[in-house]
Amino acid sequence: MLIREVLLADGLGAFYYDDQAAIAVGAIADGFTYHGQPLTAGLTAVRMPARSLSIGIVLEDGSIA
């Protein structure tokens, strides 16, 4: 069976990332969020939603997996 097309869709995951370095030095919890600056490279907030990537393939018979 041949793959005719690859489908990609980004989204949000079911959990979140916490910047443990920022929390360890005093980021202040406010309910579900934290106030403070992130310290870990790549994070833009102390708590960020997880990201996801869904991948689908369209097969030669038109079915999608």
Image (spheres, helix red, strand yellow):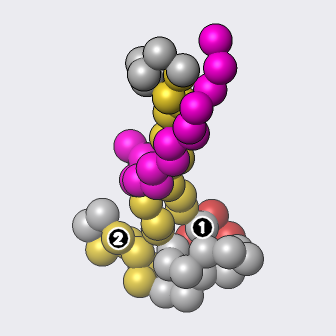
* Circle 2 SS class: strand
Q: Is residue 47 above or below residue 44?
A: above
- Tell which circle, 2 or 1, labels the residue nearer the N-terminal end: 1
- Residue extending furthest toward the right: 41
Q: Quadrant of residue 31?
A: bottom left
* Residue 26 vs residue 18, the one in the foreground: 18
**Mark 2 surroundings: few (<14), some (14-19) or many (≥20) residues within 10 A:** some
**On residue 33, which mark appears?**
2
Mark 2 and mark 1: Cα distance apart in space: 11 Å
* Residue 50 vs residue 1, the one in the foreground: 1
- Residue extending furthest toward the front: 61
Q: Which residue is mark 1?
A: 19
* Residue 41 vs residue 2, the one in the foreground: 2
Magenta part of the protein: which range?
Answer: 1-15
Q: Is residue 5 magenta?
A: yes
The residue at the point 42 percent across, 22 percent down is 62
The residue at the point 57 percent across, 39 percent down is 6
**On residue 50, which mark appears?**
none
The residue at the point 56 percent across, 37 percent down is 5
Residue 39: give x, y in percent of width and height: 67, 80
Q: Amino acid at mark 1?
A: Asp
Is there a contact, CB below 8 Å, between mark 2 and mark 1? Answer: no
Q: Amino acid at mark 2?
A: Thr
The residue at the point 40 percent across, 53 percent down is 12
* Circle 1 SS class: loop
Q: Is residue 35 magenta?
A: no
What is the tally of numbered marks visible in this picture?
2
